[in-house]
Amino acid sequence: MRLTMIGLSGALALAAPLAACSSQENGSNASDKGGGAITGGGQDQPTPDNLNDDPQNSVVPVTLPSPKPMAGFPPAFRGRWGMVVTDCDPAKGAGSNGLMVVSASSLQFRDARATLGSLAAIGSDTLTAQLNYSGGGKASQRVDRLTLVEDGKTLVRQEQNAPTSFRYSRCPA
């Protein structure tokens, strides 16, 4: 039989897993108390049954950026954007279904135009715009969120409270 000596730090390293095993055998596993367990840092922490039970965010404080009002769409958002490659074909002009042209104060589509009511920046690449849409004999107001992704090569437009979003690629100059 071979004996090996370990120091105090080695003994402590072995004791932690053994203690965790014995608490699970005694039925005190955090995952048995509802909702499962979050594992991290070598310890199990109980997951709340309802993550909305902390309206004051005392568990994980969340800081949202304050919207900053703007006068017009920044240069990074302006230009021609297409949903598919053929939308950017200059020979088609404004006749492409998926073409969106962003100017300082409006969004222009094939059959509609949205003029800017108000605009606020939420971070460096996300804007919230209150827009006045007109086209096809109809007029409406909406709030859209515009986000630049992929280093400004893609623009995502999402209507507020709508489950769908529209992805546009920047058209070549």
Image (spheres, rainbow, N blue to C red):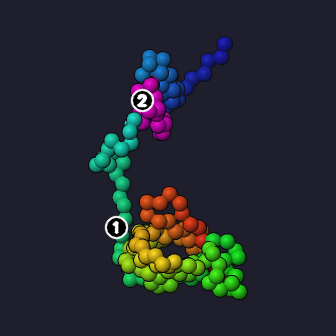
Instruction: Find the distance from the CA under tag 1 to the CA under tag 2.
Output: 36 Å
Residue 66: numbered disc: 1
Q: Nearer the viewer, residue 36 or 20?
A: 36
The mark total stands at: 2
Mark identifier at residue 58 = none
Span colored in magenta: 29-47
Instruction: Estimate how packed mark 2 is, as few (under 14), some (14 to 19) or many (20 or more) residues with alpha carbons within 10 Å.
Output: few
Q: Which residue is mark 2?
A: 34
Classify mark 1: residues with Cα within 10 Å, few (<14), some (14-19) or many (20+). Answer: few
Residue 101 appears in the rendering: yes
Quarter of the figure that contains the N terminus: top right
In the displayed structure, 170 sits above or below 58; it is: below
- Considering depth in this image, is 49 or 42 the residue closer to the camera? 49
| Figure quadrant of residue 117 | bottom left
Residue 21 lies left or right of residue 132; in this view the side is right
Residue that extends furthest to the top in the rendered view of this protein: 1
Residue 8 drawn above or below residue 166: above
Q: How far across and how far down the image is residue 87, in percent?
A: 66, 77
Amino acid at pointer 2: Gly
Furthest residue to the front?
137
* Helix, strand or loop for disc 2: loop
- In the rendered image, residue 94, in percent from the top left (x then y), is placed at 62, 84
Please state which of residues 103 and 137 is positioned toward the viewer in this rendering: 137
What residue is rendered at 65% in x and 16% in y? 2
Q: Nearer the viewer, residue 142 or 43?
A: 142
Viewed as shown, does residue 18 lie left or right of 128?
right
Q: In the image, what residue type sits under mark 1? A: Ser
What is the x, y in percent for residue 3? 61, 18
- In the picture provided, is 147 more to the left or to the right than 62? right
First reached walking from the N terminus: tag 1 or tag 2: 2
